[in-house]
Image: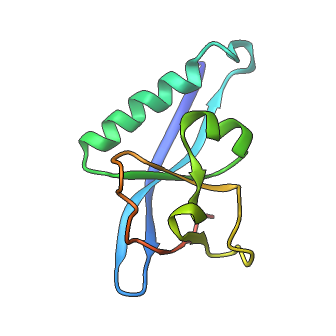
Amino acid sequence: MIGQIVLYKTNITTSNNVYTELLLSPISVHPDFFRRGIARAMMTEAFRIAKDMGFTSIFLCGNPDFYHKFGFKGSYEYEIFHIADKTEKAEWCMALELIPGALTRKAGTINIQ
């Protein structure tokens, strides 16, 4: 095995609802295979499957320099804040809409461990 990706359910809690989406954690590639597009290929396929299953967004905590290349943005840009983030500007808590506009009107918190 040279890589793996895991997606599991997580919740966005708003003032009047709970929305179930997906959390990416972890993704890994064996160091001998870095910079060959393996992480991108795994994410592309996993996100396609997630979308086919009816999920509309993916969340993660990680390095913004790496994940911004894949379209992730700070979740605060969607007014969704990590429960531990008192600044409401945590760059390390990120979201990707699989369907444009999926996070509109879902302002709230997410508790990613």
Residue 1 can be seen in this image: no
Q: Position of residue 83 (x, y in %)?
A: 62, 76
Query: What's the residue at 56%, 35% (across, down)?
Result: 70
Residue located at (34% from left, 81% from top): 17
Q: For residue 68, what is the image quadrant?
A: top right
Query: Relative to 38, is 60 above or below?
Result: below
Colour style of the rendered protein structure: rainbow
* Quarter of the image that includes the N terminus: top right
Residue 4: x, y in percent? 55, 30
Q: How many marks?
A: 0
Q: Residue furthest bottom?
A: 15
Residue 71 to residue 20: above or below:
above
Q: Residue at x 45, y 70 (%)?
A: 12
Residue 19 image-quadrant placement: bottom left
Image coordinates of residue 29 in percent, x first then y, are 65, 25
* Residue 14 is at least partly visible in this image: yes
Considering only vertical position in the picture, is 28 above or below 112?
Answer: above
Position of the C terminus, as image quadrant, is: bottom right
Q: On screen, 33 above or below 5?
A: above
Residue 46 left/right relative to 68: left
Residue 90, how many percent across, how many down?
A: 71, 63
Closer-to-camera residue (74/49): 74
- Identify the residue shown where x is 40% and y is 61%: 103
Compared across the picture, whether 90 is left or right of 15 comes to: right
**For this rendering, which residue is in front, 55 or 26?**
55
